[in-house]
Amino acid sequence: MINSPNSRISNMAKDFGVKSKTIIDILEANGVAGKKNTATLNEDEYGMVVEALTRDNQITNMTQYLSGEVDIPRAEK
């Protein structure tokens, strides 16, 4: 389940199937420095991360996805 804003970076990373470092790198690229994986994101930071993750992980062909020809990469559990 995707957490709401004001969640920890580590929880958000787990929910989105990425490493905490990926989220920290997104924040740093957008001028938010000094966050650790246990830090809590405010609403703006949360939205910034969601936007970057969805922008960078677009499916280019929905027909191929629905037919099973393309898969969405998922983090190992």
Image (cartoon, grey):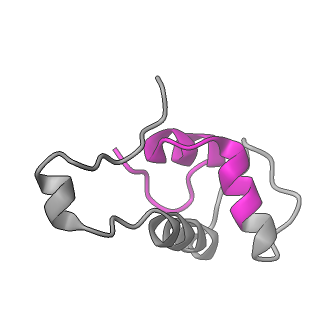
Q: Residue at x 25, y 67 (%)?
A: 61
Q: Residue at x 45, y 67 (%)?
A: 54
The reply, left or right, for residue 25 in relation to residue 10 is right
Q: Quadrant of residue 49?
A: bottom right
Residue placed most toward the observer, 11 or 61: 61
Residue 10 on image: x %, y %: 62, 41
The reply, left or right, for residue 5 in relation to residue 23 is left
Residue 21 on image: x %, y %: 73, 46
Residue 2 lies within the magenta run = yes
Q: Residue at x 81, y 55 (%)?
A: 35
Residue 1 on image: x %, y %: 34, 44
Q: How many marks?
A: 0
8 versus 33 height, above or below: above
The reply, left or right, for residue 41 in relation to residue 16 is right
**Magenta span:** 1-26
Q: Quadrant of residue 66?
A: bottom left
Q: Quadrant of residue 63?
A: bottom left
